[in-house]
Image: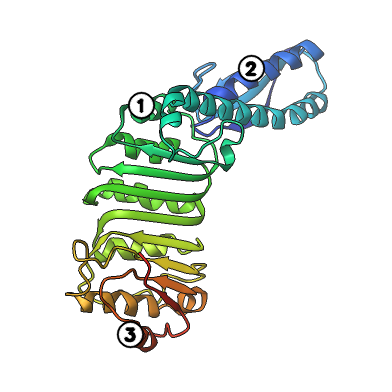
Amino acid sequence: MLYIYHIRSFKISSSHQALIFINIKKVLLEINHLTGIRITLFSESSKLLSVYSKSLKIYCVESLFNTSYILSIWTLLETSILVKSKEDEYNRCRDLYFSIFSDEIKTKPLDCCSKNEPEKSDFYFWFDTSCYIKYVKELYPLKFFDTHKIRLCNIRSKNKHISNFLKHSFSNKVNTVWTVSMDTEKINNSKNFKSIIGLSSLALKEAGFATFMFNSYQLKRLIASFRHVKSLNINSCKLSIPKPLDFSSSLKNSNITSLSFIGSGNRHKSDWNSNLDQFINLIKGLGSSPDLSKSLQEINIGSWGLGNTEAQQIFTLNNLNNVKIKFRF
């Protein structure tokens, strides 16, 4: 008599599928060696041994066997599949990075990364440089490993490699993420803006944006999406704020203690010296959030002509009188 048992459905994320699949095969062969029980993989789409299936179902085919016995073995080995696959992915991402950028890292002091401790390093991705584009293309479908800081530099909205990297290969978590556009890039592509907003769930402590052009809607979404980080930097950006922003309900449970707008008020950006009403609209919006008013400790507005006394008056009128104002470049 032939018995067929469905032992387990096994979900696989897109970035791990190939590596996990390889390790599952090894484990099943080991079970067969230990028990003599033959086990087969079927994908959700009924394609046998499909590497790119999002879900694999484990079947055991044998005439007579102890179901609890095989399940106990599988439970012990199931965790090792994920752990081993994660290690393999980490090593492949690391080795690929340092093989491509071995010469680049030696000549660029800005790449503060260590092969021995990449999880504590500061990684730059220059999206106008061929070797970085090569790495991003070869990395797919794996994810870049979790690390301390990632800087995405020279972003252009029409660069498909940027959106693909953000969507498929960006780290699962990173303490700090910075994105820098090329020459005050206007984010007029909703897909790319959603990709940038999507980074909010991956940045743990700090986020920064530089030389972008944001309208009121985008700025509001940006600040609201990153309200969980401690430090949020929107530097050297051109901001269009014709009306006061309303954060009264969108910044609940804010953890932001530090905001920076260094360079954003300068003459070649938002020109707040000539458009003081737009700066006031920004401060009014920030002060409209009860939670942000409690969490926020300091704002660096940069140096663009506003004096300390006038700044204090604006902040006091908008429920931010306890916030320390900085004027640093």
Residue highlighted by disc 1? 131
Image location of residue 128, percent across then percent down: 28, 35
Image location of residue 91, percent across then percent down: 58, 26
Q: 55 above or below 36?
A: below
The label nearer to you, 1 versus 2, is: 1
Residue highlighted by disc 3? 314
**Disc 2 element:** helix
Amino acid type for the residue under numbered disc 2? Lys
Residue 62 visible somewhere in the drawing: no
Q: Residues within 10 Å of mark 3 (few under 14, many from 20)?
A: some
CA–CA distance in space, label 1 to label 3: 48 Å
Screen quadrant of the N terminus: top right
Say which quarter of the image contains residue 127. top left
Residue 307 visible somewhere in the drawing: yes
Say if mark 2 contacts mark 3, CB within 8 Å.
no
Say if mark 1 contacts mark 3, CB within 8 Å.
no
Q: Is residue 259 left or right of residue 246?
A: right
**Disc with the residue nearer the chain's start (1 vs 2):** 2
Residue at (22, 49) in percent of width and height: 183
**Disc with the residue nearer the chain's start (2 vs 3):** 2
Amino acid type for the residue under numbered disc 1? Cys
Residue at (27, 75) in percent of width and height: 279
The residue closer to the viewer here, 126 or 102, is 102
CA–CA distance in space, label 1 to label 2: 34 Å
Amino acid type for the residue under numbered disc 3? Ile
Q: 152 above or below 264?
A: above
Residue at (35, 89) in percent of width and height: 317
The residue closer to the viewer here, 88 or 113, is 113
The residue closer to the viewer here, 104 or 17, is 104
Residue highlighted by disc 2? 25
Q: 21 above or below 144?
A: above
